[in-house]
Amino acid sequence: MNRLSTPAVRPRKRPSQLRSRETVSAIVEATAHILSEVGYDGLTTNAVATRAGVSIGSLYQYFPSKDALVADLVDRHCERMNALFGAVFMRALTLPPRDLARAVVEAILMSKLENPALSRVLREQLPRVGGLQRLEESLRQVTQVVATYLASHRDLLRVKDPERAAFYAVTMGESLTMAVTTQRPEEADAAIDEITDAVVRYLFK
């Protein structure tokens, strides 16, 4: 899978040694904390370097700009969400369709709610850092997995085209979990049931 590749947001180099990887991890973690606290406008490379405990020169070895920092966070977020989806989906694969859908919705929503402010800022900055393509690719991968599952349960489907059904179901789940995360996080428990119900009613007879 290609990472974000726009020159302004592409990392200068990838760490290969343990110490370098630890430095990059500290920088990325500091970026996430600052974004959560003050948003994109308040984020500066100097503030990130200070919080990470590294020199500004060390930061610039890996990230040429604050947009590169945010782009890397977007990339990591997409990878994490895909990995989470895959793990939960495989564990729930033998469950009835509604239970599987609920397990996925709950896992994705609760993951986003671990840091709602960060989830919101990353979503807001997707166009700035070239992240829309990355998110769309992430969702395409999830959609392919769901479409394969639905094809094996074709007799239960209300929408007969598994690929189209998967596209709308995944888009619905992604949009609704993000809306709850950014606008109604206090309704998480009810939202899990409501989103699951919406997805299942759309998909199945």
Image: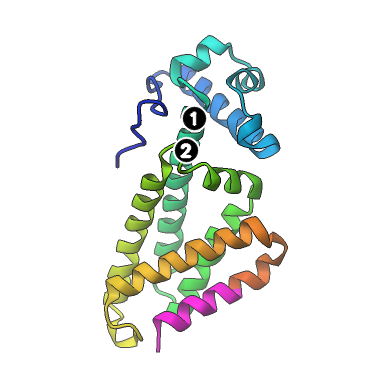
User: Looking at numbered disc 1 in the image, what kind of residue is underneath it?
Assistant: Asp
Instruction: Quote the CA–CA distance across marks 2 and 1.
Output: 8 Å
Q: Give the position of the C terminus as an image quadrant.
A: bottom left
Relative to 162, is 11 above or below? above
Q: Residue at x 54, y 60 (%)?
A: 107
Residue 205 or 68: which is nearer the viewer?
A: 68
Look at the numbered discs 2 and 1 and tell me whether their residues touch, using CB distance below 8 Å: yes
Most distant residue in the right direction: 186
- Whether residue 189 is visible here, answered yes or no, is yes
User: Looking at numbered disc 2 in the image, what kind of residue is underneath it?
Assistant: Arg
> Is 46 part of what is drawn in magenta?
no
- Magenta span of residues: 193-205
Q: Nearer the viewer, mark 2 or mark 1?
A: 2
Q: Give the position of the N terminus as an image quadrant.
A: top left
Is 115 placed left or right of 159 in the picture? Answer: right
Is 151 placed left or right of 169 in the picture? Answer: left
Magenta residues: mostly which secondary structure?
Answer: helix
In the rendering, which numbered label is found on residue 67?
A: 1
Q: Residue at x 63, y 32 (%)?
A: 41
Is 151 placed left or right of 53 in the picture? Answer: left
| Residue under label 2 | 128
- Whether residue 96 is visible here, answered yes or no, is no
Classed neighbour count for the residue bearing mark 1: other residues with Cα under 10 Å, few (<14), some (14–19), many (≥20): many
Residue 19 image offset from top left, x and y in percent = 49, 17
Relative to 128, is 45 above or below? above
Relative to 43, is 127 above or below? below
Relative to 111, is 42 above or below? above
Q: Residue at x 46, y 22 (%)?
A: 63
Q: Residue at x 53, y 48 (%)?
A: 123
What SS does tag 1 mark? helix
